[in-house]
Amino acid sequence: MTYADAIQYLYDLQLFGAKFGLENTVRLAALAGNPQDRLRFIHVAGTNGKGSTCAMLESIYRAAGLRVGMFTSPHLVSFAERIQVNRQFISEPEVVRLVNRLQKPLKEFPEDHHPTFFEMITVMALIHFAEQNCDLVVWETGLGGRLDATNIVSPLASVITNIGIEHSEWLGDTVEQIAAEKAGIIKPGVPIITAARPGEGLEVIASVAAKQHAPLTSVDLAEVNRPPLDTVELSLHGPHQRLNAATALAAVRVLGETIAVGDDAQRQGLASVRWPGRMERVQTASGRNLLLDGAHNPAGAEALRVAIEAEFPESKPTIIFGVFKDKDSTSMCHSLAPLAGRLLLTPVHSDRSEDPARLVAACREVNAHAVIEVCASLAEALEKTARDPFVVVAGSLYLVGEAMELLHLASAPPGDEKQLNEWIGRR
């Protein structure tokens, strides 16, 4: 099996769609020797900020001298981004070996109960982290929490960043229903840390925590001024990232007796954390200034708006925007379009893309003065804005990943591995 064969095998697992439930993952992990039993986890769920919070936790614990695994999704460019140890991507030979290793266990499943792509890679990650002798694994949910494949682990602590409306076809139509699904990662007696707000899921999380006798730490905006965060210059930009940092630090403090982390490691971790595609400032060799942000839902778009107004108060950037059709694109346009001096609407390279022509009216409604153009592709939009002094690319992580490839900010694999992110759209 070559690496291309392994990726194709994973891609073919998309045919089994997205299934909620832990039965397959529990069984596949057992057939692989239950590698999760040899690991310690911090389990992270939430609507927005999961990946950034995971990256901050990873950076802090690595600065403290631990060997840290990190499992996140989706990836921007390469599948290997999902499985990292001390921020080193899993290697191509290792992907091939793990896919090969799981071939025999997979034959134990009947066709109508075959593990999905996400169930497969969850167990691949567990094996990899156990074999790499990780001291700690920062473990992000894929979707929801209660029935997410990642929920087979018993963590040291659980984190729920926040709650918003998303993936209603899977998680429910109300904040309360979604909060209940995400609160499913709370385990008996295991500490839970959350930045969810009153009226936006906190009450549901608190209720589940009380039933599980899980100590609850609630992080509010006042925490962003608590030492050491009050004097740290975060490498991740935007006010929302300071709340993510406060949430990560709260988890570190809660686990202080289990894993001690000094102030210096906390400061170093936050100052040096990397998380591409989230308020990422880029200056190309030609001197072009861009901001890349995967603001993929209304809350993310609003956070980007606040960040741009705070950090670039005098600017009227050119905004390149593309979004999925299952998102509240009108709300997202209403957040971002007023900022723009020029607005280019583009499709996302996915079957789930919204037709950019359908976004024009929502943008024009809140910004009658900007030049608004519809482009056939992101490549066209980037070419048209080559001489613009400040360009923001936002609306979807898929769009950001494509921008990173086109701008040569990331090495693109031979095949289009971004398509592996499409598993959720298939049943």
Image (spheres, helix red, strand yellow):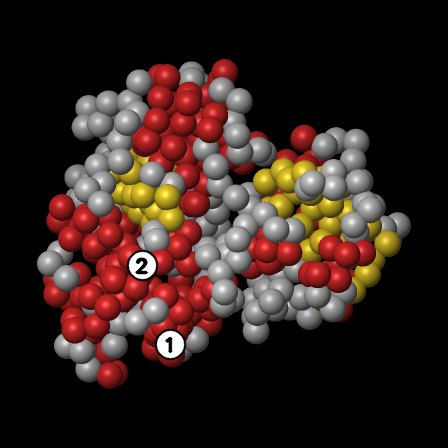
- In this rendering, would 391 be left or right of 281? right
Amino acid at circle 1: Asp
Q: Which mark is residue 93?
A: 2
Can the viewer see residue 21? no
Residue 411 horizontal/vertical position (percent): 53, 53
Considering only vertical position in the picture, is 398 above or below 308? below
Tell me the quarter of the image containing the N terminus. Answer: bottom left
Would you identify the image quadrant in which residue 138 lies?
top left
Q: Residue at x 56, y 59 (%)?
A: 398
Q: Residue at x 50, y 16 (%)?
A: 231
Would you identify the image quadrant in which residue 151 lies?
bottom left
Q: Which mark is residue 12?
A: 1
Q: CA distance from mark 1 to mark 2?
A: 19 Å
Q: Residue at x 35, y 17 (%)?
A: 263
Q: Nearer the viewer, residue 243 or 53?
A: 53
Residue 393 horizontal/vertical position (percent): 67, 50
- In this rendering, would 111 be left or right of 235? left
Considering only vertical position in the picture, is 383 above or below 387? below
Tell me the quarter of the image containing the C terminus. Answer: bottom left
Label total for image = 2
Give the secondary structure at mark 1. helix
Amino acid at circle 2: Pro
